[in-house]
Image: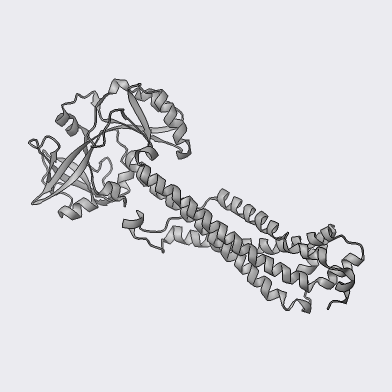
Amino acid sequence: MNFELLIARRILFSDSKSEAISRPVVRIAIAGVAVGFAVMILAISIVTGFKKEIREKVIGFGSHIQISNFDKNNSYESTPLDKTQVNVAKLQAIEGVAHIQEFATKAGIIKAANDIEGVVVKGVGMDFDWTYFRERLIAPQPPQRGETPLQINDSSIPHSGVEGALISKIIADKLRLKVGDKVIIYFIPQYNRPRPFYVSGIYQTGLEEFDNKFVLVNIDHIRKLNNWTDQQTGGYEIAIKDFERLSELRDKIYENTDPQLDARSINKIYPQIFGWLDLQDINGVIIITLMLLVAGINMISALIIIILERVKMIGMLKAMGSESLSIRKIFLYVSAFLIGRGLLIGNIIGVGLCLLQNNFHFVHLDQQSYYISYVPVSLSAMNILFLNAGSLIICVLMMILPTLIITRISPLKAIRYS
């Protein structure tokens, strides 16, 4: 058996009374490592979960990639493109593309009774994927099979000849609207051509960037107002299967698109949101770094006390011919075991708290400030594995410094030491 490992095990599992001082210190150090590591797991899981939730909200509203004309302006007034310019079947065949749907936008004013509100009307077609909005409908709950949120199969609501519009909860609260209420939308600049709609559904994403202004209607209304043909549309939204391949697939889609058209990824369309999300990584790194330093300092203190309590043993080992390097390995094994015990406890605490939060959402947030009503967590086995390995290696490397004391211990003086 490995000599250093054998001695380390004797030190760890002995019941010597001489360890009366080191035992409580070691327990405190292990507790420090456990708490620090639990905080690290929580930090990385919360940052990952928060980014994932907000990213999915933004992507659910605007897809991963949008194809539009290069001269698209910032007034939400779509410049039409011809459907023949986009080979949908060819783009759909690109490996990694999940769904393609057309859309168009137009600025407008929604009026209900004596209240008005400026909005952006987003027109969607029969190919629109309603999964995202079905999950975020406040009313009605839930839509019947075969329905879209722009339809209501309710004979008690008088909406004959009038089409539906999906509005946000913020807009509904401002205009005091409920499902089935009739509204008028004035489109810019065709103020003399108002369109009546009924509220077919009310959604809430938690992102004020969208909830404050977007109303969804049938895309044919925008076509008629803009005098477009059935072969013209505002653009296409493309959903992909893996966000990590966003840049790669955006480039492939751009290469297979008409030169007069642009393909923009969602992080370029909403740079302020994705830039803010990237800043969350810095917070995670700072927390992990601080926790590693605290855990390392706790273990250094504990290891120094263990070494001082074993000065006589160190002197005897040196007198019998053991080299300082070999003796240092003994205490590195000891520290590695203690750190490992702390990591195990930290894993149990950290993962346990994450699972509880994931299932019960007992920690809440202000949705207006954080875009989500609870603290989201995303547990990743790979992240936890790397965190364990990295923490163990870094903390053990930090233990090299206190073991330098061993090189300064004289065998003669150590044997006399009691």
Residue 148 in percent (x, y) is at 25, 41
Q: Is residue 259 visible?
A: yes
Indicate whether 286 appears above or below 56: below
| Residue 49 sits above or below residue 251 on the image | below
Can you see residue 372?
no
Image position, residue 33 (x, y; %) = 61, 64
| Snapshot colouring | one colour
- Which quarter of the picture shows residue 29? bottom right
In terms of image quadrants, where is residue 63?
top left
Q: Position of residue 395 (x, y in %)?
A: 66, 58
Residue plotted at (88% across, 61% down): 322
Locate the N terminus by quadrant. bottom right
Q: Residue at the spot x=51%, y=59% of the render?
A: 42
Q: Nearer the viewer, residue 70 or 263?
A: 70
Residue 240 in the figure: left or right of residue 75: right
Q: Determine which quarter of the picture holds residue 228.
A: top left
Q: Nearer the viewer, residue 328 or 234?
A: 328
Which quadrant of the figure contains the C terminus? bottom right
| Closer-to-camera residue (222/264) | 264
What number of labels is visible? 0
